[in-house]
Image (cartoon, helix red, strand yellow):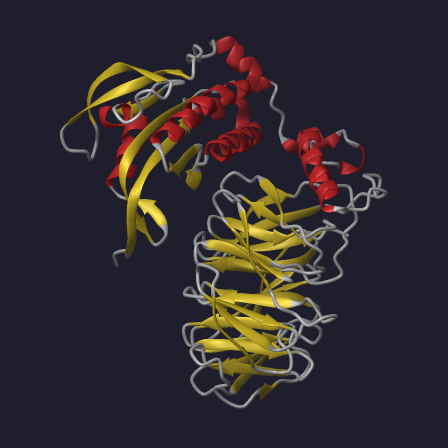
Amino acid sequence: MQRRTVGKGLGAVLFTDIVGSTAIAAEIGNSRWGELVTRHHRLIRGQLRRFGGREQDTAGDGFFATFERPVDAIRCAFAAAEAVRALGIEIRAGVSFGQLELVEGKAGGLIVITAARVMSVAGAGEVLVPAAVKDLVPGTGISFDDHGTHRLKGIEGDIRLFRVTEVDGRTPAEPLGAEEAAERRAAIAPATSRRAGIVGGLAAAVVVAVVLGAWALAGDDPNVTGDVASPPHFGVEFDAESGEEVQRIPYPNPGRPDVSHLGTQMVAGQGAVWVEDSTAYVPTVLRMDPVHGDVERVVVRGNAFSLSLAEGLDAIWVSSKTLIRINPGTRELREVFQIPLPAGGSGETSVATDRKQLWIGTAQGALRRVDPTGAVTAERTVTDGIQLVTASQDGVWVVDQLAGVVVRIDPVSLRQVAAPISLPGTIDAIDVMGDHVWALDFGTGLLTRISVLSNRQVGLVTVPAGATSLDAGLGAVWVGHADGTITKVDPVTTTASTFTQVDGTIRALAVDAARGSIWVDVRRT
């Protein structure tokens, strides 16, 4: 099925990658290579922010980004090539400019292919552009020399390319000598090695400085120090078919206790896994990169005690007293709006997406429909209180925990479709998949199946007690438990079986449909 093109516009495209990456990875080993790539990504993203670039994608050790102007893309590529030499590596880059096709919100089209093909011709430290781009930037302090005529794969005709030789009075440095480059790479130690000798298991000094700086700016308690160490905390990925552990990603340890007494939120999508940071004293989300295994903190700020996360509409959405949109590529934050709450009322909110729009429920029973731009398109008080929301193309389901009911809401009128469905016990989690809604009582392990077609309870499954999380996808319902067990429930036969177990307490669980895997947020006590 073809993807839908939703818009067009002019823009510049930049592609980069590390020269000789296969040989370097073999030279320094997987662990140090992973650390090198993490640092490389940090440097490239810093230059993208500096020059106004928008990260579109990363693949292995390469970057794909877009800019409004070709001059910014060229300056970014030139600066990035200089910056990464500190790691003992060289990158190559290609820049193009023209009509970008926006396919489901992402840049595509011939101009993207052109930039990738131009990059493939570049050598170590080189930034190449087609003649058409060179002609667009006269008088900007950028100089070029002729790189010759090339036939690029997938591009009709020969294209003359030019190499950037000067940017604002600076000329490219010669590529590092082999010996010097190897010495710089040898100085790169994996994050686990750097942490091993630090009392309390603190993260690397750079990470700690950044995190503590963010806490200080947010008004954290200055009397809390790194002497209080948190238990080991990490994300684990399991293959959804075999149950085998794919990878384990440790989180940076701030040396603070786990301050969360509430359930932790976790979602997978937009090229990463996103987890509420329960060690932070201000609203913070951890971004796990499943390809490179690095973790980045995104400080949302504010004074909320708990967060609700949702993935969809080309963004990550964080809801509490404020709705925040996180750009998954750049990690830019945009405060969409303050969620109206009564004076002295609870700031608890819940957020969900149905791939077309966003839904926000408040503890006061108000349900708001929000479009992808962040505009509220409808709102109504639908019940006495909303603690949980889930949605699909068939409808919206909200949970009033105090009343012990699930209420189905029409997505157009925002009115109740049928009478509330009373369930036994507490409704701690809810999700929808296909023709059924699933609601779970963590304490008793009662998992209720509700028919979307009849709007009635049609089954009851018992999973082990002590559940902590629920998510549905990849043809099953998945439940995480405090003892580290993951239970898999077949939605057709309603049989529950132990899928796998991890050493620690599962705090949250998320289905990663793109990778065919199950992620869990784990803490050892």
- Looking at the picture, how far across and down is residue 485, in whole percent? 64, 61
Q: Is residue 465 visible?
A: yes
Q: Residue at x 53, y 71 (%)?
A: 368
The quarter of the picture where residue 17 lies is top left
Q: Is residue 503 visible?
A: no
Q: Residue furthest left?
A: 157
- Looking at the picture, how far across and down is residue 122, in whole percent? 32, 21
- Looking at the picture, how far across and down is residue 36, in whole percent? 54, 28
Decide which of 193, 276 is in the foreground and name it: 276
The quarter of the picture where residue 56 lies is top left
- Looking at the picture, how far across and down is residue 273, in whole percent? 54, 51
Q: Quadrant of the N terminus?
A: bottom left
Q: Residue at x 26, y 37 (%)?
A: 98
Residue 36 falls left or right of residue 157? right
Decide which of 368, 269 is in the foreground and name it: 368
From the viewer's perspective, is residue 460 above or below residue 13?
Answer: below
Decide which of 272, 281 is in the foreground and name it: 281
Q: Residue furthest front?
A: 139
The quarter of the picture where residue 142 lies is top left
Q: Residue at x 68, y 62 (%)?
A: 263
| Total numbered circles | 0
From the viewer's perspective, is residue 386 above or below residue 503?
Answer: below
Residue 132 falls left or right of residue 318? left
From the viewer's perspective, is residue 354 above or below residue 46?
Answer: below
